Every structure is written in structure tokens, then in C-alpha cells.
């Protein structure tokens, strides 16, 4: 997960993927990539069906707003039928959806699991049926999927830690609270590891002070807000900065800060560049988010699925040039690891320009002036 790996990956993906501008509705019809099937006349799928199971909608709008349409389009453009379903946070539903797709003999199964246990179990079932699996966005620890597509999640955490450190650089001894994601989600562990790689030396030196770190089960925003409020109360209302693992948790933290007259005074991190998160940044209530161009992730997963559906393992290996460590399974998983971006107020325009959020969604009312100043229209 280091820069030289990502640089090589960027070149590989750039050569192999048809990446139109983010948010565009059509792929580049001029692609000459011979390893990807051309769409059948009339848009009919000729390559077979690829199953995709997404985890939920409660903690982040990304799964239905971005991942689903991007995956569907990329697979359809390659001549495959995409069966994209969402488990809505229900482990039993996730398993049932997987059983149905395996029963239909999908060519490949792409899984963004609720937790590693269910994801690993589904991968074992699929592979027993001769169906290749791809871990999508979240690596299933102790699993058996041969490939993994995500962003460099430790780098995500490093950006969050660096963002907070930058915001507090002139406040020696600033008191920091860390509100982390679900302990069952390996991504949350990687985010925390990345954050600590930046912040732990500052805690050790006394430049910053860690008040408390707390993981939040199921990425539950309401629980995250309640937990932060209790930590703030226990610390006598004192906090100088908050690491929140995503924009949903950041929003819950900001709600508590508002109740205490601290919003806009306490920098808060986030992730996913959601409309709510970007508006909070424009208001000054949230310091930064991490922008992950999900279209690149979806198209990389679709490209990998097409290669596996055709039995082109050499092509899949050439695309998945990164490595992700699975400590529970004591293995390294061939991976496509994409580059996240630290986004503060000055970077909001890029998210809009790339089509992930519309200006109309974030620039109304009190935020119109801020958008005009940043050239967002």
C-alpha cells in the first residue's frame, strides 16, 4: 500500500479501464481494449450474469447512489448482466442473496460484506460451486477470495490523521477524541491504523492529547453521537479536535458540538465526500473529508470480474498488482488499491466537477455565497 505500488497500479488501470469522466452516463465508445467484451446489439448481455451484494444503506449513501449504478453500467458495457442487490445490514439477507446468486450460477460474485465472517462464508460457498469471488471495498479476514478491489484504506486513515494534525498544529496539547467505525469491518481497523501512524507520535510527544478512542458497532451514527456526547461530558465539555471515521459519524459528532456551542470551533474529520459532509465543510463545521472516486473502484471491480468470467487469470493478475494483508488468514490477497484524496473546503469543487455531487445539492440557501466564492456552480 505504498506510493510506488499505487503509481504502477495507476498506469495498469489507466491502460486497462475505460474511465469516462466521473458522473458521466456513457462510457468511451472509442476503447480498443480487446479483453473486454463489446456490448451486444441492443444492450443485451452475452457474457452471462455477475452477482454483486452490497452491505447496507444506513451508514453511507454511497452504496446505492454510486456503487450500484457504476457497477451496473460498467458490467453492462462489458456485455454482462449485473444482478446488484443490497443486504440492508442484515446478515441473513446477505447470505440468502448469495445463495440465490450461487444457485443461478453467476459467472463471478462481487461481495462488499457486512462483516468478515459472513463474507468469508459466502466466498467459501461460491468457490465450492466453482464461482470466483472478489472482495469489494472491504477485505474479508480469514476469507478465500483471490482478489480484492478497494482504496488504500490505511492511506485514508493517514489523510484523516494528517488533516486533524494540520488543523491543530498551532494548539499544543490539544485534546482529541477518536470515533472509529465498526470493529468487525477490516476497513475500520485500517483507517484507525493509518490515523495512529500520524497521530500517535504527537500523542507521545505531548503535542496532542488523546482523550479517548471508541469504535462504533455497525457504523451506527446515532450510537456514535451518543458515545461522543458521553465522552465529552466525562471530559467536562472539553475537546479540541475529533477524528470521525466517516461523514455519517462526523455529522453525529457535529450535532453534539452544536448543542454545546462548539461547532465550527472544533475541527472534525470525515470520509466519503457525501453531500452532507461537503455542506458541513462549506459551513465550517467539518474540517475535511476523504474523497474516494467510487467510479474508479466500481470500474476496476467490473474489469476484474470480466477477466475472471472469461477465465483470464493472467489478465486478472496483471490488473491486481497491489497486495493486501489478511492477518487472520495469514495470506496476501492480490489487490487493486486506488488512491484517496484529502478534501478540505478548497477541494469541494473537484468533487462537484467530477459529478459525485451536484452543485444544486450543496449550494442552496446559506451556502450559496460559499459556493460562489469557490467557483462551484
Image: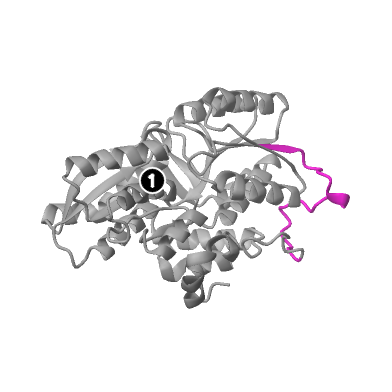
- Does residue 46 appear to the left or right of 207 in the view shown? right
In the displayed structure, would residue 167 be above or below residue 194?
Answer: below
In the displayed structure, would residue 57 be above or below residue 95?
Answer: below
Q: Residue at x 23, y 54 (%)?
A: 199
Q: Main secondary structure of the magenta part?
A: loop
Q: Position of residue 373 (x, y in %)?
A: 47, 77
Asked whether the viewer can see residue 5, the reply is no
Which range of residues does the magenta coloring cover? 30-51
Asked whether the viewer can see residue 289, the reply is yes
Q: Position of residue 154 (x, y in %)?
A: 37, 50
Tell me, yes or no, whether the highlighted magenta stretch contains residue 274: no
- Does residue 127 appear to the left or right of 190 in the view shown? right
- Does residue 345 appear to the left or right of 56 in the view shown? left
Q: Which residue is mark 1?
A: 252
Mark 1 packing: few (<14 Cα in 10 Å), some, or many (20+)?
many
For the C terminus, the quadrant is bottom right
Q: Say what secondary structure mark 1 lies in.
A: helix
Tell me, yes or no, whether the highlighted magenta stretch contains residue 38: yes
Residue situated in front as seen by the camera: 61 or 147: 61
Q: Residue at x 17, y 64 (%)?
A: 171
Q: On the image, which quarter does residue 267 sit in?
A: bottom left
- Does residue 201 appear to the left or right of 31 in the view shown? left
In this view, the residue farthest toward the left is 206
Amino acid at each position: 500500500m505504498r506510493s510506488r505500488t499505487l503509481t504502477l497500479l495507476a498506469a495498469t488501470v489507466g491502460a486497462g479501464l475505460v474511465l469516462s469522466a466521473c458522473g458521466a452516463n456513457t462510457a468511451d465508445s472509442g476503447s480498443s481494449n480487446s479483453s473486454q467484451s463489446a456490448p451486444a446489439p441492443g444492450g443485451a448481455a452475452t457474457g452471462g450474469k455477475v452477482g454483486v451484494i452490497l452491505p447496507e444503506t444506513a451508514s453511507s449513501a454511497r452504496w446505492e447512489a454510486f456503487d450500484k449504478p457504476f457497477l451496473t453500467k460498467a458490467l453492462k458495457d462489458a456485455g454482462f448482466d449485473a444482478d446488484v442487490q443490497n443486504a440492508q445490514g442484515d446478515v441473513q439477507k446477505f447470505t440468502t442473496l448469495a445463495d440465490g446468486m450461487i444457485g443461478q450460477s453467476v459467472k463471478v460474485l462481487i461481495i462488499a460484506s457486512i462483516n468478515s465472517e459472513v463474507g468469508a462464508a459466502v466466498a467459501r460457498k461460491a468457490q465450492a460451486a466453482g464461482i470466483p469471488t472478489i472482495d469489494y471495498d472491504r477485505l474479508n479476514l480469514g476469507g478465500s477470495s483471490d482478489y480484492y478491489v478497494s482504496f488504500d484504506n490505511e492511506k485514508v486513515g493517514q489523510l484523516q490523521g494528517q488533516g486533524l494534525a494540520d488543523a491543530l498544529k498551532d494548539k499544543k496539547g490539544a485534546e482529541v477524541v477518536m470515533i472509529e467505525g465498526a470493529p468487525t469491518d477490516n476497513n475500520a481497523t485500517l483507517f484507525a491504523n493509518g490515523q495512529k501512524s500520524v497521530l500517535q507520535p504527537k500523542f507521545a510527544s505531548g503535542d496532542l492529547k488523546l482523550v479517548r478512542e471508541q469504535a462504533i458497532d455497525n457504523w451506527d451514527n446515532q450510537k456514535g453521537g451518543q458515545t461522543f456526547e458521553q465522552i465529552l461530558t466525562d471530559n467536562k465539555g472539553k475537546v479540541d479536535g475529533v477524528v470521525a471515521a466517516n461523514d455519517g459519524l462526523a455529522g453525529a459528532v457535529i450535532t453534539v458540538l452544536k448543542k454545546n456551542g462548539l461547532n465550527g470551533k472544533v475541527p472534525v474529520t470525515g470520509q466519503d465526500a457525501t453531500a452532507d459532509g461537503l455542506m458541513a465543510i462549506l459551513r465550517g463545521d467539518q474540517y475535511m473529508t476523504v474523497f474516494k472516486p467510487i467510479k474508479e473502484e466500481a470500474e476496476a471491480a467490473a474489469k476484474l470480474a470480466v477477466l475472471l468470467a472469461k477465465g483470464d487469470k493472467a489478465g486478472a493478475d496483471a490488473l491486481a498488482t497491489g497486495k493486501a494483508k489478511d492477518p487472520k488468514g495469514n495470506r496476501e490477497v492480490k489487490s487493486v488499491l486506488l488512491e484517496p484524496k484529502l478534501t478540505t473546503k478548497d477541494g469541494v469543487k473537484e468533487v462537484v466537477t467530477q459529478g459525485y455531487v451536484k452543485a444544486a445539492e450543496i449550494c442552496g440557501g446559506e451556502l450559496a455565497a460559499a459556493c460562489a466564492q469557490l467557483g462551484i456552480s
